[in-house]
Image (cartoon, rainbow, N blue to C red):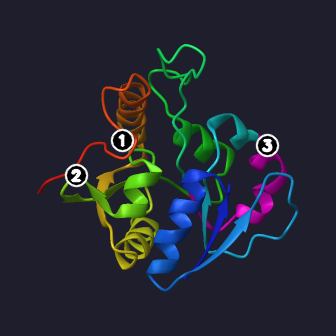
Amino acid sequence: MNVTIFGTGNMGSAIARVITAGGNTVQSINSGDDTAVTGDIVVLAVPFGALDQIVATRADELAGKTVVDISNPLDFETFDSLVVPPDSSAAAQLAEKLPASSVLKAFNTTFAATLTSGKVGDNPTTVLIAGDDADAKEQLAQVVTAGGLKAIDAGSLRRARELEAFGFLQLTLASAEKISWTGGFAVIP
């Protein structure tokens, strides 16, 4: 599988390591880079505020592809709220703007360190995946598990709101030094 990742920061790099560990290939694209998208799966490892620019310049290229939103749309100035309406999510807004793509929410409830180590404490790192396209979710889950992590189908794209709230909670706890940036929450079956 060929996966394109927008963003080469901590999360983009950690996701790239997971993907290549599973024998898949990665195309990394930085902001401002006009390289053509080659991946069947496209991971948007960028802040919420950068999504609109990618949509504005790449919507045609993203048509027919699985697009994975990893953003947590929170107010980074106050760390006190999500910046999307209570009945929506960043992923739902992205799906409205990319109707010809299969939009998924994933990776936003994990930190880069737990993606890299494959562990949250003594437990395996689990990637929660929400979306309305069962085939797209299964394809991403195969890439994640091939890379040594666990994947769980978290339900429809409507569950993205809860995933974003969960990611928000985890980020605020880490920024307040109540949990470690190398830790987080584990899913124990």
Q: Nearer the viewer, residue 135 or 30?
A: 30
Residue at x-position 41% and y-position 65%? 137
* SS category of the residue bearing label 2: loop
Secondary structure of residue under mark 1:
helix
How far apart marks 1 and 3 lie (CA) works out to 25 Å
Is residue 15 among what the camera can see? Answer: yes
Q: Which residues are magenta?
A: 53-68
Q: Tell me which residue sits at (62%, 67%) in the image.
A: 65
Amino acid residing under circle 3: Gln
Residue name at image x 39 percent, y 48 percent: 110
Q: Are marks 2 and 1 in contact (CB under 8 Å)?
A: no
Q: What whole-number distance in Å separates the C-alpha atoms at marks 2 and 1?
A: 25 Å
Q: Kindly indicate whether the residue at mark 3 contacts the one at mark 1 (C-beta within 8 angstroms).
A: no
Q: Amino acid at mark 1?
A: Arg
Return the residue at label 1.
159
Task: Tell me the residue that label 2 is attached to.
Answer: 121
Q: Is residue 55 above or below residue 162?
A: below
**Classed neighbour count for the residue bearing mark 1: other residues with Cα under 10 Å, few (<14), some (14–19), many (≥20):** many
Q: Position of residue 69 (x, y in %)?
A: 55, 50
Q: Is residue 133 magenta?
A: no
Q: Mark 2, residues whose alpha carbon is within 10 Å: few (<14), some, or many (≥20)?
A: some
What label sits on residue 53 in the rendered view?
A: 3
- Quarter of the image where the C terminus is located: bottom left
Q: What's the CA distance linking mark 3 and mark 2?
A: 37 Å
Q: Which residue ends up furthest to the left in the rendered image?
A: 189
Dot 1 or dot 3: first in sequence order is 3
Q: Secondary structure at mark 3?
A: helix
Q: Nearer the viewer, residue 68 or 113?
A: 113
